[in-house]
């Protein structure tokens, strides 16, 4: 079996899983007004970024690997830049969630004392 086909199938299954699971998070956030907190807004934004990675980034990468296109420098740069930018944005969202949780847990007394 061709290793590119195995790679493409694995990436396709991963893309479907990423897209559907993040679509569920987006759906719950949009439909349920009571879950709209600051932390959940960060999670919504992270889910949106990951949904775009699953719907745009991974399929574009699969097509470029299987067809060995694009062959120009700028085309190749564009294809890989999509996934790199989405992954970087996702990482910064996780950093924002971690900072929010740190401030909520460790600095709670200082926040309420200053008011």
Image: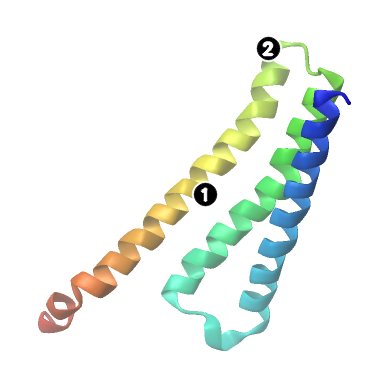
Q: Secondary structure at mark 2?
A: helix
Residue drawn 11% across the image and 79% down it: 114
**Label 2 – label 1 distance at C-alpha:** 26 Å
Q: Position of residue 52 (x, y in %)?
A: 68, 50
Classify 8 as above or below 44: above
* Residue linked to disc 2: 73
Image: 17 above or below 115:
above
Number of other residues with Cα within 10 Å of mark 1, as a class: few under 14, some 14 to 19, many 20 or more: some
* Residue annotated with mark 1: 90
Q: Which residue sits at x=64%, y=27%?
A: 80
Mark 2, other Cα within 10 Å: few <14 / some 14–19 / many ≥20? few
Q: Earlier in the sequence, mark 2 or mark 1?
A: 2
Question: Does residue 31 lie above or below 87 as drawn?
Answer: below
Q: Residue at x 46, y 54 (%)?
A: 93
Quarter occupied by the N terminus? top right
On the image, the x and y values in percent for residue 54 come to 71, 48
């Amino acid at each position: 079996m061709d290793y590119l086909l195995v790679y493409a199938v694995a990436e396709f299954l991963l893309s479907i899983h990423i897209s559907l699971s993040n679509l569920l998070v987006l759906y719950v956030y949009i439909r349920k007004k009571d879950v709209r907190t600051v932390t959940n807004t960060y999670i919504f934004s992270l889910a949106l970024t990951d949904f775009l990675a699953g719907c745009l980034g991974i399929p574009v990468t699969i097509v470029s690997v299987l067809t060995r296109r694009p062959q120009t420098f700028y085309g190749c740069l564009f294809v890989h830049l999509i996934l790199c930018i989405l992954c970087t944005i996702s990482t910064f969202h996780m950093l924002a969630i971690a900072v929010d949780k740190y401030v909520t847990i460790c600095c709670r007394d200082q926040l309420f004392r200053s008011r």
